């Protein structure tokens, strides 16, 4: 009998070393080895605090993802949430995991119809004049994070009456940001009894995972698709991507209150009528990119999924404020002004002009020069989402 090929031997695949321009990343994988390369790539951050990035291929952020693949991941992570009593609060981490968290929340609602639940996502923008919770994501290029307390009395009651907190991010590496956010939520609602962490990848390691109850001061459960631990050895030169956050409490950045910052207790509806119209204009075999902008991500997933159901070859992605080097899992990088008016650089990765026959840019901010510049670079159409069912196409020129 022939010996098995090493490439299919999980024991040999469980260790991975990645030499990045910014240092060396060593992985020791405990779960998910067989689908690691389908779910994950590796990239180098232009960030002196952290020189590596676990780049998800099913997140719809830095890598073009099929909507059906994203929805399947949402369902898998929703299934990891243990059975619970009482209201559940789902919080998605800005900016990268906002779409993921909203999708996990909606998948969980489908599994538990009628169960009281609230979705919120953290943000780096103020919306309205209500109460803000601030916490820190220390390793981030933009460390200040905020959580809005809902203005609506019914949604606020869900937050204050919740017994379970589900925190969703694309990856967990130290758990520090989760601990900071949970502590902030418990100061507001001391009745929280348990925390569940839902992530695509979890590289905290089993030893650190065993200490989570003590760190949170609560029972903690975890659900992820890839698990293990990592060690990063920085190289001699740590690139710095520059300023990535200019928070001004009094500035109106055009961020919407309708899509999750102030809370949602039900799923967003897909724009079926718009998808029908757009699909009628797409020839067989043409490739379509539905592009979210910054923190505005989930609407593009819903539109992409609606197009895909109509037989359109659609991919979903989003712009980002994250500075990443063109290396490894990042082949192309476009730079342009941010459409929220902070005056910081925004980026789009792994999309080259002309790669798609159609590009639809979904945005929550009012039309502005930054959006038009992005649309001109990509030959795209602008779709301004006022609400989930009021979407206006904006002339580019």
Image (cartoon, rainbow, N blue to C red):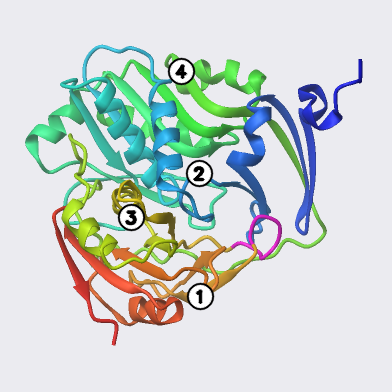
What residue do we see at 53% from left, 47% from top? Answer: 138
Q: Which residue has dot 4 on it?
A: 220
Is the stretch drawn in magenta largely helix, strand or loop?
A: loop
Q: Which residue has dot 1 on it?
A: 354
Q: Is residue 174 left or right of residue 232?
A: left
Above-or-below relation of 214 to 177: above
Question: Percent x, y for residue 187?
Answer: 30, 29
Are discs 1 and 3 less than 8 Å apart at CB?
A: no
C-alpha distance separating marks 3 and 4: 32 Å
Q: Which residue has dot 2 on it?
A: 58
Circle 3: element type? helix
Graded by Cα atoms within 10 Å as few (under 14), some (14 to 19) or many (20 or more), the crowding at tag 3 reads: many
Give the mark nearest the N terminus, 4 or 2.
Answer: 2
C-alpha distance separating marks 1 and 4: 46 Å
> Furthest-bottom residue in view?
397
Q: Specify start and end residues of the magenta stretch as a single range.
A: 324-330
Graded by Cα atoms within 10 Å as few (under 14), some (14 to 19) or many (20 or more), the crowding at tag 2 reads: many
Circle 2: element type? loop
């Amino acid at each position: 009998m022939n010996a098995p090929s090493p490439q299919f031997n999980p024991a040999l695949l469980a260790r991975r070393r990645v030499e990045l321009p910014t240092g060396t990343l060593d992985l020791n994988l405990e779960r998910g080895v067989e689908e690691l390369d389908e779910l994950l790539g590796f990239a180098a951050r232009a960030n002196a605090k952290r020189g590596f990035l676990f780049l998800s291929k099913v997140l719809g952020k830095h890598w073009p993802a099929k909507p059906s693949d994203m929805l399947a991941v949402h369902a898998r992570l929703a299934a990891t949430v243990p059975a619970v009593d009482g209201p559940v609060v789902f919080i998605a981490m800005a900016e990268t995991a906002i779409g993921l968290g909203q999708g996990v929340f909606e998948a969980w609602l489908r599994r538990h119809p009628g169960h009281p639940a609230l979705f919120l996502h953290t943000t780096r923008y103020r919306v309205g004049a209500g109460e803000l919770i601030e916490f820190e994501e220390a390793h981030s290029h933009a460390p200040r994070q905020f959580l809005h307390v809902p203005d609506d009395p019914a949604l606020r009651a869900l937050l204050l009456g919740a017994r379970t907190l589900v925190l969703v991010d694309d990856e967990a590496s130290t758990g520090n940001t989760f601990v900071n956010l949970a502590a902030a939520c418990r100061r507001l609602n001391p009745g929280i009894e348990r925390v569940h962490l839902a992530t695509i990848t979890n590289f905290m390691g089993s030893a650190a995972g065993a200490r989570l109850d003590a760190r949170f001061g609560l029972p903690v459960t975890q659900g992820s698709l890839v698990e293990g631990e990592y060690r990063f050895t920085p190289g001699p030169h740590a690139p710095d991507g520059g300023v990535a956050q200019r928070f001004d409490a009094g500035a109106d950045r055009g961020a919407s209150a309708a899509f999750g910052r102030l809370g949602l207790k039900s799923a967003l509806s897909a724009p079926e009528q718009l998808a029908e119209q757009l699909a009628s204009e797409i020839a067989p075999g043409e490739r379509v990119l539905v592009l979210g902008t910054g923190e505005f991500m989930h609407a593009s997933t819903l539109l992409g999924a609606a197009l895909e159901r109509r037989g359109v070859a659609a991919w979903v992605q989003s712009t980002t404020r994250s500075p990443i080097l063109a290396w490894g899992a990042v082949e192309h990088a476009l730079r342009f002004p941010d459409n929220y008016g902070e005056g910081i650089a925004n980026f789009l990765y792994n999309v080259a002009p002309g790669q798609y026959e159609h590009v639809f840019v979904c945005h929550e901010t009012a039309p502005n020069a930054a959006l038009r510049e992005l649309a001109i670079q990509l030959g795209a159409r602008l779709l301004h989402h006022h609400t989930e069912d009021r979407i206006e196409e904006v002339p580019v020129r």
